[in-house]
């Protein structure tokens, strides 16, 4: 089997699973793009099996610490193991991410389940070449009515792969409604955001809603109205939800009508809306900030920090003592420390003293591995204003 010799400074020796091109000392046996390769250290000691793609900056991704090929049995075992992890976490297995790439030992494979419909992403070359095996395993395990591929995004481009979407088994479904803890969501597996829904935030909708009873709530960057619906159903006195996308607002209104949540939806730029509300003297009791990722790379982190600082400052100025800000970042390029620093800076400028109420993270169907920081990308805090200077 083709073999890569890895330099001593590589991250893999510290528990990571990515091998960059600059970390490869030698290539033995003429490895081809998409091959399974063996890894060894500079002394020739075996380190496990990886997928290989010299076209990508991440040239190899470890998937097993022993000699292992990518066959039907492998995919079946790994998917079934991932299901057991989610079952142990008490998740609804019919509405969750059932496989999440490196976190479940299948680098580049993401599988989301919406009832009898599965959405599949194969974002690495080796996995894309074996998509038929993955589909076969999914048919055996889940017996779905359809499997839709959403093979889009920058990761595919970095792997030298074409962008493609559509059914790979069964017919592509029309958008349909799923329910979670009383809230309603429209899922569009082919053209919706992400793979149809932001599954990573489902639990946080409920966590934040526990802070909402009797409060006047502002939900910014609401998308399908997840936080807004949950807060309204939990007994909020008044809920306003804002998003720049008019189609998203239209869907959010449909969702709220189905769930019976009383929410005022507004299509507007959240930055402009917050600025206008703050300058007009508006106040709220709970403000939720869940923006899309402000940065896709380390090169634009500073721009992202300015964005976080601005929305935090506007929000805090509209909160009186006793008011709460719940805020989220969904980019692994922004560290937890950097994100928290934007809250600290905003609190100083707003002349508010904050007390932490709770922290938030991604749902357990997006497992976090201790030695792979990229697997922890969703950070959130709730802070209560306890004093104004």
Image (cartoon, rainbow, N blue to C red):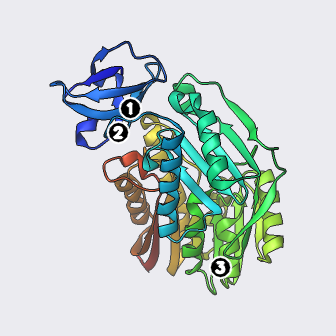
Residue pointed to by mark 1: 50
- In this view, the residue in front, 202 or 319, is 202
N-terminal of the two: label 3 or label 2? 2
Q: Is residue 60 above or below residue 267?
A: above
Q: Which mark is residue 354?
A: none
What number of labels is visible? 3
Residue pointed to by mark 3: 216
Taking the image as drawn, is residue 195 in sight? no
Helix, strand or loop at mark 1: strand
Residue sitting at 67 percent across and 48 percent down? Answer: 139
Q: Nearer the viewer, mark 1 or mark 3?
A: 1
Structural crowding at the residue carrying mark 3, measured as other residues with C-alpha within 10 Å and reported as few (<14), some (14–19) or many (≥20): some
Q: Nearer the viewer, mark 1 or mark 2?
A: 1
Helix, strand or loop at mark 2: loop
Q: Where's residue 24, x and y in %?
A: 29, 22
Residue pointed to by mark 2: 17
Q: Where's residue 360, x and y in %?
A: 46, 66
From the viewer's perspective, is 229 left or right of 331?
Answer: right
Discs 1, 2 touching: Cβ within 8 Å: yes
- In this view, the residue in front, 330 or 127, is 127
């Amino acid at each position: 089997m083709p073999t890569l010799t890895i330099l001593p400074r590589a991250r893999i020796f510290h528990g990571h699973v990515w091998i960059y091109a600059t970390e490869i000392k030698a290539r033995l046996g003429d490895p081809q793009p998409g091959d399974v390769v063996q890894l060894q250290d500079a002394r020739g000691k075996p380190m496990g099996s990886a997928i290989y793609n010299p076209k990508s900056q991440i040239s190899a991704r470890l998937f097993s610490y022993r000699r292992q090929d990518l066959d039907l049995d492998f995919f079946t075992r790994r998917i079934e193991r991932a299901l057991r992890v989610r079952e142990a976490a008490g998740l609804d297995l019919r509405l969750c991410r059932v496989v999440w790439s490196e976190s479940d030992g299948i680098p580049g494979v993401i599988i989301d389940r919406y009832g009898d419909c599965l959405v599949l992403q194969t974002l690495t070359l080796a996995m894309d070449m074996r998509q038929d095996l993955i589909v076969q395993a999914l048919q055996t395990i889940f017996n779905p009515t359809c499997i839709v591929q959403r093979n889009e995004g920058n990761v595919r481009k970095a792997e030298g792969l074409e962008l493609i979407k559509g059914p790979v088994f069964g017919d592509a479904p029309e958008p349909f409604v799923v329910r979670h803890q009383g809230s309603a969501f429209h899922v569009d597996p082919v053209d919706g955001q992400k793979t149809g829904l932001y599954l990573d935030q489902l639990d946080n909708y409920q966590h934040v809603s526990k802070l909402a009873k009797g409060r006047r709530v502002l939900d910014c960057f609401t998308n399908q109205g997840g936080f807004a619906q949950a807060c309204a159903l939990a007994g909020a006195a008044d809920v306003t939800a804002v998003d720049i996308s008019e189609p998203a607002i239209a869907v959010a209104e449909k969702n709220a009508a189905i769930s019976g949540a009383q929410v005022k939806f507004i299509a507007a730029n959240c930055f402009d809306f917050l600025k206008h509300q703050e300058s007009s003297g508006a106040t709220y009791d709970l403000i939720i900030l869940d923006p899309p990722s402000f940065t896709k790379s380390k090169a634009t982190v500073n721009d992202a920090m300015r964005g976080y600082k601005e929305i935090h400052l506007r929000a805090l100025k509209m909160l009186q003592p006793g008011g709460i800000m719940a805020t989220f970042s969904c980019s692994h390029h922004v560290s937890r420390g950097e994100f928290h620093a934007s809250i600290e800076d905003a609190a100083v400028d707003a002349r508010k003293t904050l007390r932490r109420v709770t922290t938030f993270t991604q749902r357990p169907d997006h497992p976090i591995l201790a030695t792979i920081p990229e697997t922890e990308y969703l950070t959130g805090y709730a802070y209560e204003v306890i004093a104004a200077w």
